[in-house]
Amino acid sequence: MTHFQIDNDHTAVGFAARHMLLSTVRGRFNNYRTQLELDTDDLTQSRVEVDIDAGSVDTAVPARDAHLRSQDFFDVEHYPTLRFVSRKVERLYPAHFRVTGELTIKDTTREIALDVEFGGIAEDLVAGTRLGFIAKGSIERREFGLLWDKVLDAGGLVVGDKIELVIEAEAVSGTKPQAWTPPEPPSVSRTAAPSAPS
């Protein structure tokens, strides 16, 4: 098992949501910290932990980002960190995997699955072993307490419930400092909600 670190210069932690049933709003989180323990001979034995700075949400519209940080959505004052911890890695095809784990947003933890395409391994003379992957999944935001919305005059909601997740990443085995350190967890009780029926 080898410890890897995400290369922030070649990584994007992104999401997308429908807006007014007309278009898709895309955003990203700029600050995150990872712990990757990868078995390059058998990736199904690997383990991933990711802490994301909720306050670093960035949709390129400052007013919208401020709303996302507010109590209507992430409530970053009380819940500054989003967290994902893998529980199982399954190989579906030679370069495709399913990573199942627990995602915590605010005070709710639910199981989600990410489909991961492994991009391969290369040797980097500076950073050591380098690998790449793309992970995709989706969540229903209301299941995580992100409840704010408005109903359109013609029906439908301003913000879609389904949130698409896309993480494009490179990781390196060498030492590469991570700029952001997650804060201590808030002193609130976290409620583990059961997984939604499929």
Image (cartoon, helix red, strand yellow):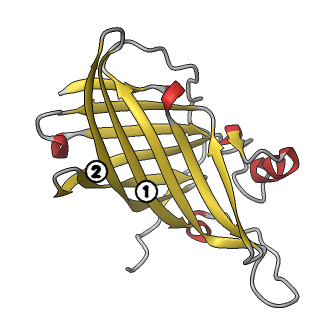
From this view, report whether residue 23 is shown above or below residue 90.
below
Residue 153, by quadrant, is bottom right
Provide residue 123's location: percent of width, then percent of height. Answer: 26, 19
Residue 137, by quadrant, is bottom left
Residue 190 seen in the current view = no
Q: Residue at x 75, y 75 (%)?
A: 22
Q: Residue at x 70, y 44 (%)?
A: 78
Q: Which residue is mark 1?
A: 136
Query: Is 78 placed left or right of 111 in the picture?
Result: right
Q: Which residue is mark 2?
A: 87
Question: Dot 1 lies on which element?
Answer: strand
Provide residue 91's location: percent of width, then percent of height. Answer: 18, 55
Amino acid type, label 2: Arg
Amino acid type, label 1: Lys
Residue 113 seen in the current view = yes
Q: Are marks 2 and 1 in contact (CB under 8 Å)?
A: no
Query: Residue at the left extreme?
Result: 41
The CA distance from mark 2 to mark 1 is: 17 Å
Q: Which of the two discs, 2 and 1, labels the residue nearer the N terminus? A: 2
Q: Which quadrant of the rendered structure holds the N terminus?
A: top left
Query: Is 57 placed left or right of 38 in the picture?
Result: right
Provide residue 105's location: percent of width, then percent of height. Answer: 57, 53
Query: Is 182 placed left or right of 174 in the picture?
Result: right
Q: Residue at x 60, y 66 (%)?
A: 141
All told, the count of numbered labels is 2
